[in-house]
């Protein structure tokens, strides 16, 4: 985290309310998976910190978003539509481009127990901020059996001279037993990951959620739409010229990924909860 907070030449705060990289606040997310015969149901709830008052140093976690989706029958993860890796054998590193899909759910058709358990979910701010490995930062009433839970703590940054977001996430999985009365979960070690995505992608895909059968969306699926070219920097900001290398939007993205890789791999290693991230 400290590495990214010092990367002023590459990153900006993503929120307009943050002035410095060190001001970036985490977003906490809980991803629940429930077993269901037509396909597992997934609930994703996110919270962000909001100050109690302008004069207070205290903050509380307020729900930011809530999303329901359904996986394909017998699938454990979202269906993969695209999976491409750019490998660098000399550095033992890779960037993965993937596109996955799950079914949108009409929430009015969900069984009452799913609404009940979703409405009962409460975050524990103290545990979330402490990033405890042995405790969940969410609690809920067992109206429906939970198959698995993934907890995420994410920090969002903006890549300079672009509309790309860089997301640093710490995530930890818990898998619950399917036997009756089972309450002890199998807890996995936490991991860290970095993702880069464009702000327009969610907007375009949102048009697919309730698309009638036989109809197509009206957006262009060309490379220029998905990887738009960055604007050139102003004359008084020529130090950022390196951020817009490449003749195409995709080429510029690859250049940015290379800068991110250098930042992560060349900086002195940091320790996160017993794990090292370059």
Image: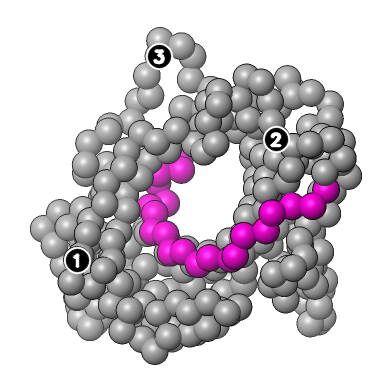
Dot 1 alpha-carbon crowd within 10 angstroms: few under 14, some 14 to 19, many 20 or more: few
Q: Can residue 115 be seen in this view?
A: no
**The one of 37 and 204 positioned closer to us in this rendering:** 37
Q: How is the image coloured?
A: one colour
Measure the C-alpha gap from mark 3 to mark 2.
31 Å
Q: Is mark 1 on a helix, strand or loop?
A: loop
Residue labelled with disc 1: 89
Q: What element carries label 3?
A: loop
Report the mark closest to the observer, 3 or 2.
2
Task: Give the mark, 2 or 1, whose residue is nearer the N terminus.
Answer: 2
Q: What element carries label 2?
A: strand
Q: Position of residue 220 (x, y in %)?
A: 28, 32
Report the mark closest to the observer, 2 or 1.
1
Measure the C-alpha gap from mark 1 to mark 3.
43 Å
Please identify the quarter of the rendering in which residue 54 is found: bottom right
Residue at image point 21% right, 53% down:
250
Residue labelled with disc 3: 215
Q: What stretch is highlighted in magenta?
A: 183-205
Q: Can residue 89 be seen in this view?
A: yes
Q: Which mark is residue 176?
A: none
Residue at image point 23% right, 56% down:
86
Residue labelled with disc 2: 34
**The one of 90 and 214 positioned closer to us in this rendering:** 90
Left or right, 251 with reference to 84: left
Whether tag 3 and tag 2 are in contact, CB under 8 A, the answer is no
Q: Position of residue 270 (x, y in %)?
A: 48, 85
């Amino acid at each position: 985290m400290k590495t990214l907070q010092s990367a002023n030449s590459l990153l900006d705060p993503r929120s307009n309310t943050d002035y410095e990289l060190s001001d970036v606040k985490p977003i906490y997310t809980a991803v629940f998976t429930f077993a269901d015969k037509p396909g597992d149901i997934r609930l994703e709830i996110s919270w962000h910190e909001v100050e109690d008052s302008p004069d207070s140093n205290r903050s509380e976690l307020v729900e930011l978003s809530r999303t329901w989706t359904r996986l394909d029958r017998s699938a454990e993860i979202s269906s993969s539509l695209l999976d491409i890796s750019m490998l660098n054998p000399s550095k033992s590193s890779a960037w993965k481009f993937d596109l996955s899909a799950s079914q949108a759910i009409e929430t009015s058709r969900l069984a009452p127990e799913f609404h009940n358990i979703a409405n009962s979910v409460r975050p524990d701010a103290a545990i979330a901020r402490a990033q405890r490995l042995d405790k969940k930062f969410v609690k809920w009433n067992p109206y429906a059996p939970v198959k698995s839970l993934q907890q995420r703590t994410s920090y969002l940054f903006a890549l300079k001279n672009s509309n790309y977001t860089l997301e640093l996430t710490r995530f930890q999985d818990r898998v619950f037993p399917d036997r009756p009365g089972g309450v002890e979960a199998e807890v996995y070690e936490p991991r860290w990951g970095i993702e880069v995505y464009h702000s327009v992608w969610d907007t375009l895909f949102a048009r697919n959620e309730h698309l009638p059968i036989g109809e197509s969306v009206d957006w262009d699926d060309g490379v220029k739409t998905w990887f738009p070219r960055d604007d050139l920097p102003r004359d008084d900001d020529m130090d950022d010229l390196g951020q817009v290398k490449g003749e195409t939007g995709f080429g510029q993205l690859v250049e940015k990924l290379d800068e991110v890789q250098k930042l992560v791999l060349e900086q002195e290693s940091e320790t996160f909860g017993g794990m090292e991230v370059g």
